Amino acid sequence: MKLKLLASISISLLVARWRQTLVAAVGVTFSITMFIALLSFMAGLNAMLDGLIINRTAHIRLYNEIQPSSFQPIEHYGPLENGHHFIRSIKPKNDRMGIYNSAAITETLKHDKRVMGVAPKITTQVFYNVGATDLAGVINGIDVDAETKLFSFKDYVVQGNYIDLKNTPNSIVLGKGAAEKMLVQLGDVIQISTPKGEQFQLKVVGFFQSGLQEIDKVQSYCSTQTTQKILGESNTFMSDIQMKLVDINMAPAMAKEYHKVFGIEAVDIQTANSQFETGTKVRTLISYVVGITLLIVAGFGIYNILNMMIYEKMDSIAILKATGFSGKDVNAIFIAIALSIGVFGGLLGLLFGFGLTALIDQIPFNTSALPTIKTYPVDYSMSYYIIASIFSVFTTYLAGFLPARKASRIDPVIIIRGK
């Protein structure tokens, strides 16, 4: 019965100043709406930018690093009693680029439960022969099926059919930038030269566009069999072994483990893209700071409105306390008013925030640099709505706490005597 009476009094005070109440609720609604829209858009943007790098990057890459020999011929003479060996301009040892026992390593990785998938690869520098001009380029020899499964290769082939790279012998998928520089069309035959000076003709079956212009100007793709043929290597030759993990956070530790086990270089995605990951975290942090600032500003609006309400309702508060209402009851009334504003404004904010996010998701975003993106990217994660709900209630509670405490301490004798 008492709770029902307190609720009735709270509603009466809200209705008595409905315009100010509406302004406070609108402030909360606007803050929640912008909070959700901002975080959803920024998270979608981060996901898109991450996709340009992360989706095309192996969690761990194994390769054979060409390094100077750790043992020099002069060391056969043993240590000198009164001197030291000084060796300068040490050249790399004579070693091949390929990974030894690549087939056995690949098979071992496929049986590791921590590994989602493995994609062997061959990377080699070439020259695209365009008339009397040679353009520097890079050919990536890939397993088309594995590359598509793990790195969404087919999504970046903007012209032609990606599967033709597997089914058509001596074929190539050129980077969009390289194709434009060479004025090449689908079905054309181009000529390349290897670093050893050997020439090879390849049929263009598609164009690849990653969204990174500098990469698209030099990069191209062939099947592993074609690349092995270009280099004159056996069908076991591989220069890289790429893998995706079940848990990307395990990459640094697993890279160190594979380096010790297989005796080859291993680089993890966190090390390879540390700067890019930092940029994503900074953008996300800025989004949260701006969104929370909006909620705090709305809280100040509620605080001011409740302060004015208490000042104007001094007589009513004095009468309530004189008729038997305790300070806790008065405190509960004004806390209820603040939370009512926060909950009502928060619910509308969640609804409008979803609507604004959906509207942004429909706005066309067409750019030749990002062929796979058709509209502005957004993220509909439920976590943003939960965070917004918690902050709206928490902020409005704090905004109502001090005014409610002030109202609960009013001495009815002093107010009535003053009148």
Image: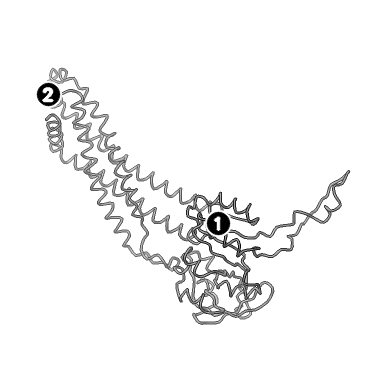
Vertical comparison of 399 with 23: above or below: above
Q: Is residue 175 above or below residue 51?
A: below
Residue shown at the point (69%, 73%) measured from the top left: 196
Q: Which mark is residue 116?
A: none
What is the three-letter code of the residue carrying label 2? Ile
Picture quadrant of residue 3: top left
Most foreground residue, 7 or 141: 141
Relative depth, front residue between 66 and 311: 66
* Residue linked to disc 1: 60
User: Residue at horizontal 24%, vertical 29%?
Assistant: 403
**Which x, y percent locates residue 106?**
57, 62
Residue at 60% of width from left, 67% of height from top? Answer: 123
Q: Are marks 1 and 2 in contact (CB under 8 Å)?
A: no
Q: Amino acid at mark 1?
A: Ile
Taking the image as shown, residue 53 lies to the left or right of residue 69, namely left
Name the residue carrying label 2: 319
Q: Position of residue 299 (x, y in %)?
A: 28, 38
